[in-house]
Image: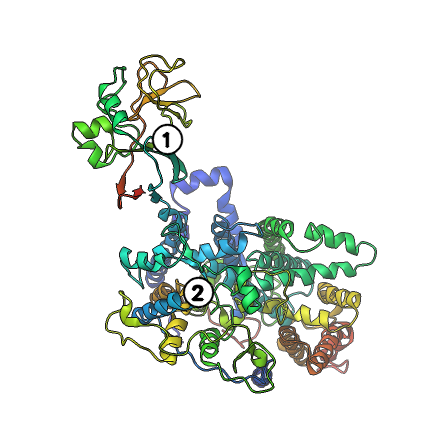
Amino acid sequence: MSDQIASSGRRQFLAMATGAVGAAGVVVTAVPFVRSMQPAKDTLAMATTEVDISKVEPGQLIVVPWQGKPVFILRRTPEILGRIESERVELRDPDNEDPEGGENPSWFLKGDKKTRTFRSRRPEWYISSAICTHLGCVPLLREEPGTPDLGSDWPGGFYCPCHGSRYDLSGRVLAGYPAPRNLEIMEYKFLSDTRVLIG
Amino acid sequence: MLDYMMRTRLFKWVDERLEIGALIRSQATEYPAPNNLNYMWNFGSIAMVVLLLQVVTGIFLAMYYKPDAALAFDSVERIMREVNYGWLLRYMHAIGASAFFFVIYMHIGRGMYYGSYRKPRELLWIVGVLILLVMQGTAFFGYLLPWGQMSFWGATVISNLFGAIPWIGDFMVKLIRGGFAVADPTLNRFFSLHYLFPFILLAIVVLHLQALHVVHSNNPDGVDFKDLKDAARTVPFHPYYTVKDIFGVGVFFFFYAFFVFFEPTGWGYLLEADNFIRANPMQTPAEIKPLWYLTPWYAILRSFPWKLVGVAVMGASLGIVFFLPWLDRAKERSGRRRPIYREMLWVWFLAVFALAYCGMHRPTPALLLLSRAATAYYFLFFILLPWTSRLDDPKPEGA
Amino acid sequence: MKKKLIALLAGLALLAATPGAGAEEKPLLAAESTLNPTVLKRGLAVFTAVCMGCHSLKYLHYRDLLEAPFNLTRKQVDVIRAGFLTNGLNDGLTTMMDGADAVAAYGVVPPDLSLIIRARGSGADHTYSLLMGYRPAPADFKGNQYNIYFPNNNIAMPQPLIGEDVDFSAISYLDGVQPKATLEQEAWAVTSFLRYVSEPAQIRRVQIGLWALPFIAFFTWVAWLWKKAVWSDVKSRGSDSTAEE
């Protein structure tokens, strides 16, 4: 142990040094705490959901959960596809110009007319969010055209019971109803003819 | 550096409205501390750091832990495997609990050796023992939460003890458990209490510091300074002891980190093997025992074949500690100047070690004998202290 | 004072050396398990081919096999999955054996093995010894199966591995492995695999520790220098000069 009294310069330097190393240590220690609040691995794994569509009949609609939210999968018949092309109802956003409040996949944004009309990767399979863009209810499928309660020019589509919003069989919202946007198309891909990965 | 910060305009603005400058001066920069404290005096500040660590890790763990009997065990494994750095939070918290007790036992040992409980520090001592009791409660509640075999059966055994109390025993047991056996209601309320107790602890620690700052620290010689401004015997707490405490915390963290990163189960002492098995109310593990820091009292409890006697004596073993300041009648304060007291105290420490060892193992006849002998000495140390403490006093004949 | 400390420590050492319960059992074999990814993959192969007939690993998911240390491809995981009933990659590795059937056949439900290594004080040694410990039962043995490392030598599980139980050449994610393995090799591989599964974080934990401890040591050293500098102006200390640091 030396008998020399340390100069105040040395003390200050060492104070700074300890402070700097200590501060670095605190920052490094804070990282795991913050990271622990980020979504856990199993939560992130739920970001995608694989759905087996082998048992969906033509004309049948199933609703599956994805990230905790409902998703429509509708197997459209050629007759339905024909009706979509020839329907004569006024749509709010027929060309999908509104960003739809979500992240639309690139295949949709850059798609051709057929993609924009049928709003799907494969026309036979309509896959979209099942959340009404008005206030969040799940619309019902009213596939039959021209029913008494929906009117003679109803082409078939989705009808939301909460406030009456209507969508065609491509999920495009009809004008004159509360819902502002088409049903959201999210990313999905076909792993095979019987399995689709949503998300 | 601190006085530079205290001269800034920002600081002065705050100080005018909060009088924080006066607080810093009275508690740190102008607060006199003895200049001869040794490293045994570091444990108090280390304990505060560990308490903070436990609260922070606990809060982050509570973001994922589920206090439901059907979900708890899985939620802990989820934290270990799926939550980012969840394993680190869990290890820090579990090892932090043992570290907290280790540090506090060293802190108490310092107090007993150097006579820090003596007048005028009796209230400081009493508040300290209170802190120990709240810590033990916190640990007891916390240990049920992982819902492992040892968690469940340990809670079952200890909550059973309350049944020994005459008249109200049965009522107490059902009250604690929220049912007939340790089950989901028990887990839920233990989680609530485990979250609450540390904040009660923080309040008691503030009291502890307040009590300390009135009477000032003891020192290894046990001779208090008469004059608070005696420059030959005091130094201001800041920077002398802030600097020494920071160094002490560094040493602590080194050993703590060793366990967290390289030996998190602590060879079975920090995380027990049986607790990696989900609680099974139908099957008791081979040995039910608490973690090492509660084993001395567990051994005292098991020393007596009658349940109520065991519970009463275990309670008395904690109760009697409160009275230490009045049982000790020696002229000198510090063990440094009391050779006979010193020897007796070392044997007492040995007795506590022996009790811990007995508590960790099945009570064979030999260990039962040992725990009874150690319990006897544990109490005799205190009971005989009014007389034995005077043995070190100088004889009336003079120098 | 020093003498007291030595006596204390010697006493403790003596106490600690006292044999604990179960001293009458054979000492366990040393597993010397490893975290080598190649061995872990072999262990996975043994587990899915043999052990998963009865045992689950609920905390290990199929999607975890796509990452380190297994790094299997999606196709390889699907091949494994095909042998069991699963909804998707997020499922844990679950056996198809019904609990009731197991009790009828063996008297006990085969436990989930996700934490088996941590649930035994002797860790990997216990599992490895168990797998190696089956012997022909002596004439007067009245239990289920005879295993020299199990308490009372009586274990419910029939011998799972005898050597050459798995054809490693048929497993797509194993490269350059002999097609057949001895009992020791299989037991070692599956024990190592189970050791990994009981605490997947252990690899990362040690990696971080290897720089965290030197960092803390460095901080403590700098703090020490600062402490010495601040205290350098304090000469005599206390009421007498027996200054203790």
Residue shown at 76% from the left, 83% from the top: B397
Circle 1 chain: A
- Mark 2: amino acid: Gly
Question: How far from the left and from the top, in percent, is residue C227?
Answer: 42, 66
Element type at mark 1: loop
Q: Is residue C233 visible?
A: no
Residue, disc 2: C53
Element type at mark 2: helix
Q: Quadrant of residue B150?
A: bottom right
Tell which of C150 and C138 is nearer to you.
C138
* B391 is higher (above) or lower (below) than C235: below
Tell which of C178 and B154 is nearer to you.
C178
Question: How far from the left and from the top, in percent, is residue B253?
Answer: 44, 65
Question: How far from the left and from the top, in percent, is residue C103?
Answer: 56, 64
Counting other residues with Cα less than 10 Å from the Cα at mark 1, is it few (<14), some (14-19), or many (20 or more)?
many
- Mark 1: amino acid: Ala
Residue, disc 1: A130
Counting other residues with Cα less than 10 Å from the Cα at mark 2, is it few (<14), some (14-19), or many (20 or more)?
some
C230 on left or right of A111? right
Circle 2 chain: C
Question: How far from the left and from the top, in percent, is residue C149?
Answer: 52, 81
* B93 is higher (above) or lower (below) than C6: above
